[in-house]
């Protein structure tokens, strides 16, 4: 047992030294009731900005991520939010213009343009219908076809797309 108590003392000494060296490092505390409280220090990787290039089927994902990471961040000014929004846009999305140059007006214009349920549904249906023709029945090609179909059908379900006999025949 003396070995364990010496090891515990050594652990606590190292822990105290780490706490002293990096007091600003965020900690995740384990609230389990043990002899001593534990804390785990970890530095999370930076989250890259989401990128939107104007594909209707990707708007919902982009909009939600951008709102959570940037728009709802009260520490950022409107001009910083506008900068991050512009930095996140590529292709057709970058061409969207507004009357005034503000974050709210640009995000609203993007939302009006790309949050079109009919066009989003159409894009998902086209992704299923126009999927690359399988040349050889390989496991990889069949898996890609299945993954693409399931991904787009899940997206249609989230959009509460109403299926009927004609859509069942198409799908």
Image (cartoon, helix red, strand yellow):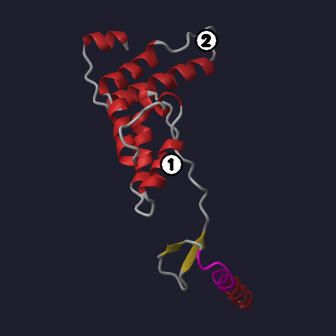
Magenta-span inclusion, residue 40: no
Residue 28 location (% of width, % of height):
52, 71
Region rendered in magenta: 15-24
Q: Is the magenta stretch mostly helix, strand or loop?
A: helix
Q: Is residue 20 magenta-colored? A: yes
Q: Tell me what residue is drawn at x 63 percent, y 9 percent.
A: 136
Q: Where is residue 50 in the image (x, y as percent from the top left)?
A: 51, 43
* Quadrant that contains the C terminus: top left
| Pair 1/2: label in front | 1
SS class, disc 1? helix
Calculate the distance from the C-alpha at mark 1 to the C-alpha at mark 2.
44 Å
At horizontal 35% and vertical 36% (from top left) the residue drawn is 109
Q: How crowded is mark 1: few (under 14 residues within 10 Å), some or many (20 or more)?
A: some
Viewer-side residue, 122 vs 88? 88
Identify the residue position indicated by label 2 in the image.
137
Residue at mark 1: 84
């Amino acid at each position: 047992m003396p070995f364990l108590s010496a090891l515990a003392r050594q652990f606590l000494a190292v822990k105290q030294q780490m706490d002293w060296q990096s007091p600003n490092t965020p900690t995740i505390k384990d609230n389990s009731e043990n002899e001593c409280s534990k804390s785990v220090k970890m530095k999370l990787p930076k989250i890259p900005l989401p990128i939107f290039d104007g594909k209707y089927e990707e708007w919902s994902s982009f909009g939600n991520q951008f709102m959570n990471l940037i728009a709802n961040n009260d520490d950022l000014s409107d001009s910083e939010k506008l900068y991050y929004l512009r930095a996140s846009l590529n292709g057709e999305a970058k061409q969207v213009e507004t009357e005034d140059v503000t974050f709210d007006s640009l995000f609203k214009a993007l939302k009006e343009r790309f949050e079109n349920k009919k066009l989003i549904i159409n894009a998902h249906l086209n992704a299923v219908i126009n999927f690359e023709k399988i040349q050889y029945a390989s496991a990889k090609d069949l898996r890609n076809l299945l993954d693409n179909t399931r991904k787009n059908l899940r997206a249609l379900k989230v959009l509460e797309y109403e299926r009927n006999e004609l859509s069942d025949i198409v799908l």
